[in-house]
Image (tube, helix red, strand yellow):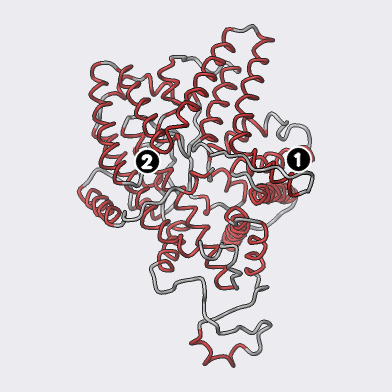
Amino acid sequence: MLFNSFAFIFGYLPVVVAVYFWLGRHNPTWAAGWLALASLVFYGYWDYRYIPLLLASIGFNYWVGLCIVQAVKPARKYWLVFAVTINLLLLAYFKYANFFLHTINTFGVTDFQPLDIILPIGISFYTFTQIAFLVDTYQGKVNEYRFIHYLLFVTYFPHLIAGPVLHHKEMMPQFADRKNYYPTGENITIGLSIFVIGLAKKILIADNIAPLANPVFSPDAHPQLIEAWIGALAYTFQLYFDFSAYSDMAIGLSRLFGVRLPLNFNSPYKAANISEFWRRWHMTLSRFLRDYLYIPLGGSRIGSFNRYRNLMATMLLGGLWHGAGWTFVIWGGLHGLYLVINHVWQFIASKTEIRTGVLWAIGSRLITFLAVLVAWVFFRAPDMRTAIDILGALVGLNGISLPRGFELYASWFQDLPVVPSFNGIQWIDFGGIGIPVLLSAMLIAWFAPNTQEIFYRYDPCLEKVPLPNSTISRYIPWSPSRIWSMVFALAFVACVLHMNRITEFLYFQF
């Protein structure tokens, strides 16, 4: 079931919310149990065959968590290592078994047949969420062990499929807070408003940009310069608005129940360097990789070389987490390299006097964005050959083709290093709304206030959102008013009218 479907918006969600608050008046435990059950139904709508796997994972990790609490100190670590190993083996089987077999076959060692495995949706997110729970239990950060609340913590449908990655200590106090079992006008109004923003990002922006990217990344496309740039930019902003949409919708849906989720997306394309990008993009995954991988590897405590090694290892594994393929490994490796270069540059800058100003700020953001775009090419491409072909096209190695109408001006191009052909633009449809939507998306991502800035007065998520520096956002803060109600009502109607084709969120595949 998709957040952007009629079945979810007009069927599932109203029933779940109504029954939740009705039960909350009588017994909060029943309400929590109902929400957990509804979350299992939401998950089972995709493929009911994997509900037993999800429940087995939940039961196993809850049991091990109790064992860790009850064990004496030496045995606590053994329980933790045992449970984390089982979780990673389960993830490795479903997500990486065929990748490893394919890699072995590629080197000609043998000829293994691929396994008949269907990847359970959301397995990466609920596995990482429970690994964090186990580590926090080992470190004494977990104080609440009611099974119903733990079941809800893992299966909670606003985050189950594509995040954010949750911490037990963040959610349990909210599930135990009795006032969250009673509806309030503030929570419902803010929740629905943020949900509509996410819905509009998905339906009106991301889905309308996708047709510009998909043909260019086809293995048989062989795009030229203009097509490659439009396709790469289209995917860069399609992924941005698709993931931003899911993050907003998750926060909005959760707020309906009085529960605040952690912030997971914060205008990453406004980042001035790659470290800031990762503090803004998929923030809960970045936090997980930092706390449970980078720091345990040694972090920055044992010298610069080891720091850079740990950064590279963390990003390579982060890339592999996103997908079982060498393109994802290269994507992670590029970001690891970017981070190393950024840390070296910051060290050099701290030892020298480097002037900064407006041009410096613009240039640093542009360089960061272009580096991210290059990495996204590997992230999106179906194979290495296609990725390299598109990168070559971005610098003109595949030639330049202009619309046939420009042939009248062929003499203007004669002195250029690369003389274009006039065979037309094969893979991009300039007659649709894709190009105008792409241009609008770029302006919104770079210059408009984000959802958290618009709602900063009402603390939309767990983190305290500071007063934004953006001048624009100071003039359009959200408030419960007729004007805002009309804006969101019109946006919702526009989304409903364009819900004739329902598409999955891109992060569902990870």
- In the picture of the structure, the residue carrying the numbered disc 2 is 1
| Foreground label between 1 and 2 | 2
Q: Residue at x 35, y 47 (%)?
A: 4
> How many neighbours does mark 1 have within 10 angstroms: few (below 14), some (14-19), or many (20 or more)?
some
Q: Residue at x 39, y 24 (%)?
A: 174
* Element type where label 2 sits in the image: loop
**Eyeballing the image, is 397 above or below 265?**
below
- In the picture of the structure, the residue carrying the numbered disc 1 is 309
What is the quadrant of residue 152 in the picture? top left
> How many neighbours does mark 2 have within 10 angstroms: few (below 14), some (14-19), or many (20 or more)?
some
Q: Viewer-proximal residue, 129 or 346?
A: 129
Q: Report the amino acid beneath label 2.
A: Met
Report the disc number at residue 329: none
* Residue 460 % position (x, y): 38, 38
Q: Report the amino acid beneath label 1.
A: Arg
* Element type where label 1 sits in the image: helix
Quick one: quadrant of the N terminus?
Answer: top left
